[in-house]
Amino acid sequence: MQLFYFRVTEAVSKDITAQVTRRTNMLNNYLAKINWEDILGKIFMTILSIVLLSIFFLIVNWLGKIVIRRSFKRTRKNEHLTSNRLNTIFTLSLNIFHYCILFFYFYAVLSAIGIPVGTLLAGAGIASVALGLGAQGFVTDVVTGFFILLEQQFDVGDEVKIGTISGTIRAIGLRTTQITDYDGTLHYVPNRNITIVSNLSRNDMRALIDIYFDPNSDIAAMSSIIERVNHELAPKYTEITRGPTFLGTVENSNGSLSLRVIIYTKNGAQLNIQRIFLAAYLDQLTKAGFKIKTSPLNLTTAS
């Protein structure tokens, strides 16, 4: 019985050994037929092609941006377009150039790897599937951005309010608009999400100054001092577009009296001009011996 078991075990072992040997020989023969030198050569050439293509497109990108910057530098000297409009066209040109470089770079890399990009794009519905899955939002962004530029809704440097975001336009691209918030935060807003735009930079802004006084004061003398301050300060500030206009005595809703001055300034300068002129009024009126009443408004900061 033991002899029989030993012979069966020996036969099975020989059979397994023969199968393993046969499969090993098949694998060795298969590996021996592979032209490793040719494969490694192709891998090396592919990597070298990708590296050279990357260097080439980096150089093209660098030179293209230099050409665009120099072209717009000359345009700023010769054309009569506003600075904000030129900055808008400049950033958009850089954006379009960037996308073109990326498109041709990836096309060249895929071609170097051996992927038939042209065949894929012209293949059975692949382009339409791509548009349906991911490119639809991109197309909407591009179309919306085109109409924003066409209608000149805003330019680079404009102060705007878009939805809940307020700040300065930093860049306008094919897909997104960049807005720098007043606290320094940089917002990237997809163009398709821009529905209502409040542009704060297209019109002059008003600085309203009220000087509250005692009704028993010499109003004529106070008015003369205010007019003199206006005459001295106004020429010093190019931000002022109209005024200062002295409206005289006005009655406020709470029954108090004030001397009112209105100054129109460029956007963003109204608060600074308001502070400067108000400080000058108070300084000169106080030196002349007039008692200035405080504003009835009580502005406090919530804690």
Image (cartoon, grey):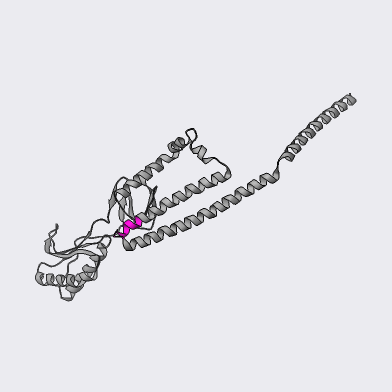
Q: Is residue 121 left or right of residue 203?
A: right
User: Which residue sits at x=78%, y=33%?
Assistant: 20
Q: Is residue 109 left or right of residue 278?
A: right
Write the start and end of the magenta stretch as one range.
79-88
Percent across and percent down for residue 111 are: 55, 44
Query: Which of the image's four quarters has the C terminus?
Result: bottom left
Q: Is residue 296 left or right of residue 189?
A: left
User: Is 146 or 202 nearer to us in this picture?
Assistant: 146
Q: Quadrant of residue 261?
A: bottom left
Is residue 124 visible from the viewing direction of this image? yes
Is residue 169 visible from the viewing direction of this image? no
Number of marks present in the image shown? 0
User: Is 28 or 64 nearer to us in this picture?
Assistant: 64
Percent across and percent down for residue 87 are: 35, 57
Query: Which of the image's four quarters has the N terminus?
Result: top right
Above or below: residue 147 compared with residue 295: above
Q: Main secondary structure of the magenta part?
A: helix
State yes or no: residue 50 in magenta: no
User: Which residue sits at x=75%, y=35%?
Assistant: 26
Q: Quadrant of residue 18?
A: top right
User: Is 187 or 299 nearer to us in this picture?
Assistant: 187
Percent across and percent down for residue 145 are: 35, 47
Percent across and percent down for residue 236 are: 23, 71
Furthest toward the right, the residue is 3
